[in-house]
Image (cartoon, rainbow, N blue to C red):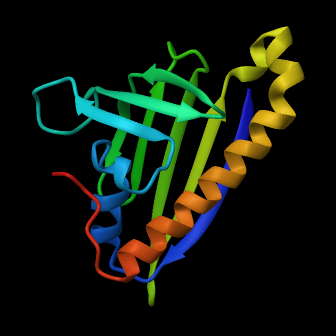
Amino acid sequence: MSTYERTIVIERPIEEVYKNVTCLRGCINWQTSIQHTEQLTDSPVGVGTRYKHIVKFMGMTGETQPEITLYNPPYEFGYKDPNAEIAFETLYTFDKLPNGTRVTVNINSGLTQSFLGKLAMPVFLTALRRQFDADMETLKALLENGVTVHAQ
């Protein structure tokens, strides 16, 4: 299992940041790898809500079906897809600051479970970090300029 962690401060209120960051349909507006999103469950958003994402990363297209595993507005949010080609689990934490919100994201990936995964890990992690860092900066710029990215 490999871990990626990123922290960023967004100069917007915690409730607004939480609503925008945690929308697994609206993430298409700031995560460049996500090409299509849809909610698979009809229930209100919460633990157990499932989505379908079509993702393009490092020239390959695949499908993931993230399921919300932690929903504690406006402080914590998590989802995972253990059945994806590259199993992953993502956890966001949100902290209220005097000038905005600190967002910390941890992504754990199961790529290292195979021999090929162990060989590809350095390239994969470098690309993941570069892309997600850029995505987080895009999110910060959008929210700080008053752009809504959530779909709900």
Above or below, comparing residue 126 to residue 146 in the picture: above
The answer to whether 75 is drawn above or below residue 15 in the figure is above
Residue at x-position 41% and y-position 28% = 54
Against 6, residue 28 (above or below) is above
Measured as percent of width and height from the top left, residue 82 is found at: 52, 17
Which image quarter is the N terminus in? top right
Residue furthest out toward the right:
119
Viewer-side residue, 36 vs 18: 36
Q: Nearer the viewer, residue 73 or 113?
A: 113
Image point (29%, 73%), residue name: 147
Q: Count numbered badges in the picture.
A: 0
Residue name at image x 52 percent, y 25 percent? 61
Tell me if residue 140 can be seen. Answer: yes
138 with respect to 57 (left or right): left
Asked whether, in this view, residue 43 is left or right of residue 104, the answer is left
The spot of residue 141 in percent (x, y) is 46, 76
Up-down: is 144 above or below 39? below
Give the residue furthest to the front: 59
Across and down, in percent, residue 81 comes to 47, 22
Tell me, yes or no, if residue 97 can be seen here: no
- Describe residue 59's horizontal placement relative to residue 146 as left or right: right
Residue 143 location, quadrant: bottom left
User: Which residue does the image show at 58% across and 15% down from the upper left?
Assistant: 85
Rendering quarter of residue 144: bottom left
| Residue 138 horizontal side relative to residue 87, left or right | left
Residue 132 spot, x, y in % from top left = 60, 52
